[in-house]
Amino acid sequence: MIATLLVANRGEIACRIFRTCRERGIRTVAVHSDADENALHTRVADTAVRLPGEAPAETYLRGDLVVKAALAAGADAVHPGYGFLSENPDFARAVLDAGLTWIGPPPEAIEAMASKTRAKKLMGLAPLTEVGESDLPVLVKAAAGGGGRGMRVVRRLEELDAALEGARAEAASAFGDGEVFVEPYVENGRHVEVQVLADAHGTVWALGTRDCSLQRRHQKVIEEAPAPGLSAELEDELRTLAVRAARAVAYVGAGTVEFLVADGKAHFLEMNTRLQVEHPVTEAVFGLDLVAEQIRIAEGHPLAADPPRARGHAVEARLYAEDPANGWAPQTGTLHRLTVPGVRLDTGYGDGDDIGVHYDPMLAKAVAHAPTRAEAIRRLAGALERAVIHGPVTNRDLLVRSLRHREFTSGRMDTGFYDRHLAGLTEPAPDPYAPLAAALADAHGRSRFGGWRNVPSQSQVKRYAMAGQEHEVRYRHTRQGPAADGVRVVHTADDLVVLEADGVRRRFQVSAYGDEVYVNSTRLTALPRFPDPAAQLAPGSLLAPMPGTVVRIAEGLTEGATVQAGQGLFWLEAMKMQHQISTPVTGTLTALHAKTGQQVEPGMLLAVVQETSS
């Protein structure tokens, strides 16, 4: 029996595994980098061990340090979570060689499937060795790991070398392995996968299907179980192929076999020899705790002959600290508050935690389960709409709109969903009354502490930035209280404002953290009444859109160089992804401030391009 378990991971998945351990009386050990010293997973574990350093390569990817931590803390088992070392056979062997129980498949099974190139050969497939015009489009893909890192779609031959270089660098940084391969890219297919669970006694369960077609940068955003709209014959084929893949490598534990489905045919992608991010939807439908099953299997217990019966439908949405309207740029800062009512919420953050640049920008997963697909979708969309998220920009509005999009609700989505609909899904739709509510709450808060007031007849003025635009608010103080044109002010407090317009009364919850103001689900920034002239930037300034590290500068780029519109000038690495910064205009590089290896913050000046006059 396992008494103490170390999770060789961080964030949401570590917290989720610890929850199961607590329920079963198993003591827990966390490992953490210096950047994660006060992270939630270290706070909820019984014991925490430091891995010196901040970058994954120095910490969570150091299997030797993790094994030492397990031995030092008195753990007798190690769970890898997902990502990092979860599909590293050498790490699995090191855990077993240290006399510890490995909560995962045998190292030989990981070795057979962890490399996507070897997995394809095992399933009778092979990657492309030479790429010609007739092969396009193709997908450059990391041989190790997943989560969208180290992946590039190539539609023109002249882009292939750059895609290979970028994918290798990203894969090496995320997984410690820069091997990549090339395969045909299936346009607008559906991403469907099968959860498998196998014991050491020869029993393999195929726990239904999941659809994970809504993706950005090849990383899943919304997942559901079961996959909608599949024929009975195709479902049987997918389950049969998944069991065949598991048996081919004598698999033990939880794993996932992934496919692209197009024109009614299944195309094998890979087998992930670990727990998946989206495992909660399978748990909800089958009434299982997959982590508990992993632990039982590792302790030698057999599975029942048949899996439990599936019931209902489950949908999961990944809440990211990112700006979908700005190239999915990851965001950092303080997460002041996070609540999503009425659904399961798996998160690695607590109120007041900082979101840094070193790791994936996923804040949480929200999961809804209901008797039907339509009910599960409605429940999840409603919960996200009512969520309180105070902190960096997130993809919450995108998730709500995606869940309510006709293409998704009808089950006709595919992996090209965001390519087709992103512009409409990210169209700003700010609440027009939010700035007024923020200003009235601010005025009430100041008046409580003896703040001054102007002559009653003179309008008060407050400026806010909202959805990328400035909004000026005017209101007056009267004998009956504050007043504004076009609305009736029913109630004001420093945290609640009630307004009535056209006979409709609405309540606005207001929270302020310095200049950051949140009115219901709308985020605003209070602006100074008189902007600082010194803050103006030269025309053509290229600013860092996100925090990160400058990992590459275009070859030969110097001041005075001529650059073409769309040309990549800099590459930033942030939250395990590389992002290209391109010049929007053709012109002359008049200033170059960025340097390779430099840490940058959002808004930092990288370069100035003077546009060529027409």
Image (cartoon, rainbow, N blue to C red):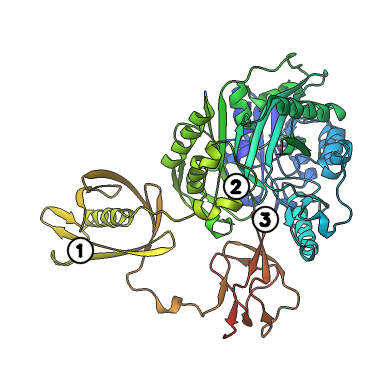
Label 2: element kind: helix
Query: Which residue in the structure is indicated by mark 1?
Result: 452
In depth, the one of 479 and 250 nearer the eye is 250
The answer for how far apart the CA atoms under marks 2 and 3 are is: 21 Å
Neighbor class of circle 1 (other Cα within 10 Å; few <14, some 14-19, many 20+) is few
State the quadrant of the N terminus.
top right
In the image, is residue 19 above or below residue 596? above
Q: Image check: 200 left or right of 44?
A: right
Residue 360, horizontal then vertical, whole percent = 63, 49
Label 1: element kind: loop
Residue 478, horizontal then vertical, whole percent = 13, 58
Label 3: element kind: strand
Mark closest to the chain's N terminus, 1 or 2: 2
Picture quarter containing residue 232?
top right
In depth, the one of 351 and 411 nearer the eye is 411
Res 110 visible: yes
In depth, the one of 559 and 424 nearer the eye is 424
The answer for how far apart the CA atoms under marks 1 and 2 are is: 53 Å
Query: Which residue in the structure is indicated by mark 3?
Result: 577
Neighbor class of circle 2 (other Cα within 10 Å; few <14, some 14-19, many 20+) is some
The residue sitting at 67% across, 78% down in the picture is 563
Question: Which mark is drawn over residue 417?
Answer: 2
Picture quarter containing residue 46?
top right
Q: Are marks 1 and 3 in contact (CB under 8 Å)?
A: no
The outermost residue toward the left is 479
Residue 524, horizontal then vertical, whole percent = 39, 57
Res 18 visible: no
Q: Amino acid at mark 3?
A: Met
Q: Image check: 102 left or right of 546?
A: right
Q: Amino acid at mark 1?
A: Trp
